[in-house]
Amino acid sequence: MTSLGWGGVGGKSLIGGSDDDSTTATPPQAQQKQDAQPETPSWATPPVPAPTPSGKATKGKGKGKQEKQGQQRPEGDAPPVVPVASQTVDGVEPGPSQRQLNTRLDDVARREAAVRQREEHIKELEDRLREGGIQVKPKNWPKCKPILYHDIYAEIPTPNQPVCKAGYYCWMISVSAYIMNFLTVSIQFFMGQGTLACFIFAALAGVTGVFCSWWTVYQSLYAALQTNGGSFAYGKYFIHKSISILWALWTFIAPPIGSLACFVAGLFVMIDQFSVGGSKGAVGGTLSIINMVLWGLVLLLASYEFIWTFSIWKKGGGLQDLEDQQRNASTAAMVFQNDTVSNAAKRLFGGAPRDDGIKF
């Protein structure tokens, strides 16, 4: 029986033929042979990105996502990688983790001990430098962000420390007074009770006053109290302090002189504010009163500090005749020699002019 072959072309007789000839001659059998070849496993083929909802393949997703997709292997192709997790029993870590924690704690303790040893060594070196005449002054003021060295107990002699504290407190009150004066003038300006020139000059006076009161007035006192009655150091302090007292008096009174008299909120400005009437006048007048109270405190404390420092200078200058000092004393000086003022100074600053053995 003859066959026309595949598609009726090139027919061959199957009678007496071999299996190989029949196999190779029949295309369906050859197709089965090709299908019997081993397939490439899915984990060995590169991943194909999934199409986006718009029908386009995603781009620019990064290699990390493709690698994660390539690591997803179907079951049976390759053994899955099982992460090794630490076994816990009722939430308690095993022994090795506890030992690691103890090791870290020991390491922290050793570092703390090393830091303490370094601090002690640095302190010892600083003591040696001081003994050799070299002063090491680390920055310690202000505490929030140290930029200067300021230590009354370390640099000021013990008898002069109370008056230095008085000068420091006077400076802090004056800073508060400068800030209050600027706020008062600013509020009056925004309420329509002042001019732009008054606002600008109040800002300049506040910034300049704060820095000058520290670098000129207080620092001159700080330097003078470290000497034994040095005339130059005390003379510079007396000049700066006199200007400071005059400025406090001017700010407290605020005389209406010139067109810029409103940059300080004192007595006459307070009168003008209350004369305006209404809520704006009441607010401006009340703020002026608060400003006057602060500047009044600055004026009184600055005068007391000035007289106290003057008594220390006379003592250090070698004046031995205390009776002459008593006869030449002014009435203002005698006001500060009463028991009430002296007791208040002792509670606030730790001393008073009477403690120096000087009678005005």
Image (tube, helix red, strand yellow):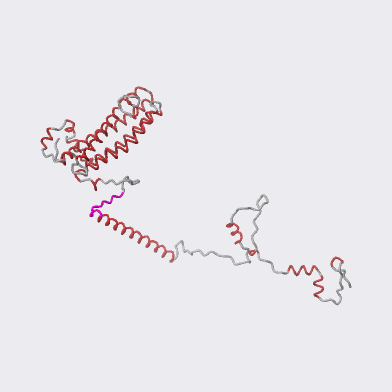
Outermost residue on the front side: it is 232
Examine the image and state in which quarter residue 181 appears.
top left
Q: Quadrant of residue 348?
A: top left
Report if residue 130 lies within the magenta region.
yes
Query: Which residues make up the magenta segment?
Result: 129-138
Query: Total number of numbered labels?
Result: 0
The quarter of the image holding the C terminus is top left
| Residue 151 position (above or below residue 295) | below
Q: Does residue 124 sit above or below 278 in this rendering?
A: below
**In the current view of this chain or complex, which residue is farthest to the right?**
1
Residue 117 percent across, percent down from the top left? 31, 59
Left or right: 326 in relation to 79: left
Q: In which quarter of the image is the N terminus?
A: bottom right
| Residue beneath the point at 27% across and 54% down | 126
The residue depicted at 33 percent of the width and 60 percent of the height is 114
Look at the picture and state if 226 lies above or below 203: below
Predominant secondary structure, magenta span: loop
Residue 143 horizontal/vertical position (percent): 32, 46
User: Residue 137's spot in the image, x, y percent?
Assistant: 28, 50
Q: Which of 162 and 136 is in front in this view?
A: 136
Left or right, residue 351 beside residue 141: left
**Pick the front one: 251 or 44:** 251
Question: Is residue 175 rendered magenta in the image?
Answer: no
Q: State whether residue 187 is above or below residue 58.
A: above
Residue 326 placement (x, y as % from top left): 12, 34
277 and 61: which is toward the camera: 61
Q: Which residue is drawn at 74% across and 68% down?
A: 34
Q: Residue furthest bottom?
A: 16
